[in-house]
Image: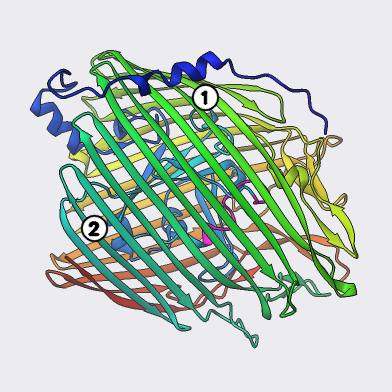
Amino acid sequence: MNIKKQVKIDRFVWALALVPLLAAPATAETLPDRETDTESQAVHQAEDIVVTASRTETSRREATKSIDVVTSEDRDELQQYFLPQLLANEPGVFFRANGGLGQWSNISIRGAGAQYTQYQYNGMPLRDAADTQTTLQYFIEDMFSGSNLERVEILKGTNSTLYGSQAMGGVINIVPRKWQSGLAAEWRNEFGPNGTSITNGRVAYGQEKYYIDFNPIYITTDGENYGGPNGYWYDNTGATFGAGVKPTDRTTVEFNGIFSDTDLALGSSPSLDSNGNLVKNQAYADQHREGQLYQVGLNWMQTLSSLWDFSLKGSQGATERHYFWSRTDGDRSDYDGKTSYVEMQHNLHPSEWLTLNLGVDYEKSDYEGREPRNKYAGDYTPVNFDESWDNKDVFAQAQFALLDRSLFINLGSRYNDHEVFDSEVVWEASAAYLFKDIGTKLHAHVGTGYRTPGLYEIYGGYLVGGRLVTIGNPDLQPEESIGYELGIDQSLMDGKVQFGATYFATRFDDMIIFDDLSSRYENAREGENSGVEVYFRVSPWEKVRFDLAYTYIDSRYKADQFTDEWTRKEYLPRNKVDFIVTFYPMDKLTLAATVRWQDSEIVPLNDPSWNSVRWEESDTTTVNLAATYKALQNLDLFARVDNLFDKNYTEGGYCMPGLSVYGGLKLHF
C-alpha cells in the first residue's frame, strides 16, 4: 500500500482528557446552579432544542447551521413508521427505494451520496465496517421507528469538523425518548396488503433518579411480485432499549441500544430490452439475504462546576450480511463488520457569551468476509478476508453568543490521525443573526470535509474460479470537500407563518467511484452539488396546517482525471416538491394528505449486450393519505393509503408498489 504515515497524537492530549475521571463527583451543595432564574428555565424548556447542530443543547432558532427536526408527532400524524420515507418530506432530503417494504433504500442529503451521511442513534455513530463504503446503506431499509422515538435531527451540509469522516453530506441523529416518569406501555399493530404486519411495543418505567425503556419491533410481509411467480418477502425482528441512572445531582449515566435481525428476498436488477424498453425486476425463488445489526452504548455525563462539564461515551456495534445464492450448503457470501467507538468531550463555560468544546475520539473498524473458493467446480470451502484499522481524532469548537444573544458565531477544527492514511485537518465557521423585532434569521456556514476510504474500498474482492478478483484499490486517497450555505428564515403572525430559503454548494476532490471498466474503486477528478431549498409552514387557523418543501439541485462529477466534461449524477432528480396538508376537524380526528413530485432522473441500466445505457426515468407524482381517530382515551384507530391513484412508476428502474391500504390500532397507557 502507498502509505506515507505515522503521525501520532501527543499522549499528553489523551492524558489531559482523562483528568476529570480522577476528580471526585461534585454535589449539588458545593456547586452553584448554572441557571437559577426560573423564568428563563421555562423559556428554555419551551423552545425547540437540538443537540446535533453544535454537539451541545442549542435552541433551534439560535443554531448557526441548517437543521431540520422530525418528531414523533409528525410520524403519528402521517402514520409513517418507516423513518427514511418520513424524513424525505424535508427540504434537501432525497429518498430512493428498490421496491416496497424491506427492499434496499437510500437517503441523500443535498445530493451527496449515502457514504457522506453519518447515522447516529442517541448521538452514537452507527457504522457497518463491512459496507462497500463504510456507510449504513444496507441497513437503511430496516430503519423503522421504535415506539420510544422522540425526534430525528437532520443536520445538513459539510460537518466533518464536528463529526469526522462520513459527515461530508450531513448527519441523521435518531433521538429516543428518555427519563420516563412513572409507568408507560404501548402496543401498535398495522396491517396491509401481501400479508404485511408491523408491530411495535413499549414498556417503560422511571422515577426522578432512574428509568428503563424497552421497545420491541416485528415486521413481516410476503411482498409484491410485480407479475412474477415470487414475492419480495421481508422479515424483521428488532428492538430499541435504554436505561439511565443519576447517582448524584451532577452525574448521569445512560445506556442505550438498537438491534435488528432481518431476512429478505433478493431479485434481478432492471434492464433494457433490444427496443430500449424497461425489463422489470423479479424476485428470485431461492436467493435471500440475512442481516443483523446491533449497537450498545454507554454515556457518562458529569458536571464538575458551573464552568465545566464533560461527557464520556462509548459504543460497541456489529453488522452481519449473509447472501445465500442457492440452497446448496456453502453457496453464500458473508460480510461482517465490527466497530468500537470511544469519545470524550469537555464543555467549558467561562462566560455567558462563550462556550468552548474540546474533545477526542477513537474508533476501531474490523471487516471479515467469506466467499466459496470455487463454487462452479463444486468447491464451497470458505475463504476468509480479514482486515482492520483504527482512527484517532481531536476536535475543538468555540461558540459565541453576542449582542444580547442576537449574533451567534461558531468556529471549529478537527485533527484526524488515521492508522493508514495521512493525517488531515478540517475546519468550519458558521454564524447566525436574529432580527428579533421582525422574526428574521440570517445564517451562513462554510467548512471543509474529508472521508477516508472504507476497508472494502481498499481490500475488497471476490473469488471466481478459485481466482481472487480485487475490487479494492490500495492506492486510493481520502476524499476532500468544501461546502457553503447561506440562508434566511422568517416567522410572521406569532409563528402562524414560517418560511425560509437556503442556497448551498459543496465541491468534492478525489471523489471515490466504482469504475466499471477497471472493475475496482478509483479516485475521480472532482464533483460538485449546488442548489436551493425552500420551505413554507402556514397555520391559518387551528384546524389546518400546510407544509411545503421544495429542493432544486444540480449534482455532477468528472468521471476521471483525464476529462474536463461534467457528468450529471445518477439516481437524483433535479427538482423535488413535498406538500402536506394536515387537518384537525375535531379533537379526536387527524387527517393528512401528502403529495410528492420529483423530476426525471438518470438511471444506468444494461442493454442485452451488457452495454451501460444512461436511461432517463420519468418524473413521478404520488399522493398518500392518513387518518387517526382517538376512539378511547387509550385507543387510537388509524388508516393509511399509499399511492392513492395507483400510479405505475419506478424508482431507480425498480418497480414500486401500486395502491396500498393499511390500517390498525394503537393501545397506549
Which residue, as the protein is rendered here, is positioned at the far bottom? 229
What residue type is disc 1 on? Answer: Val
Q: Nearer the viewer, residue 142 or 532?
A: 142
Q: Is 604 drawn above or below residue 103 in the view shown? A: above
- Residue 446 tag number: 1
Residue 26 colored magenta? no
* Quadrant location of the N terminus in the rendered image: top right
Amino acid at pointer 2? Ala
Tell me residue 22's x, y (percent).
Answer: 36, 20
The segment highlighted magenta reads 130-141
- Check contact, mark 2 vs mark 1: CB within 8 A: no
Note whether residue 113 is visible: no
Residue 11 visible to the viewer = yes
Q: Quadrant of the C terminus?
A: bottom left
Q: Is 284 on the left or on the right of 187, as rendered? A: right
Q: Is residue 421 left or right of residue 646?
A: right
Q: Is residue 578 above or below residue 29?
A: below
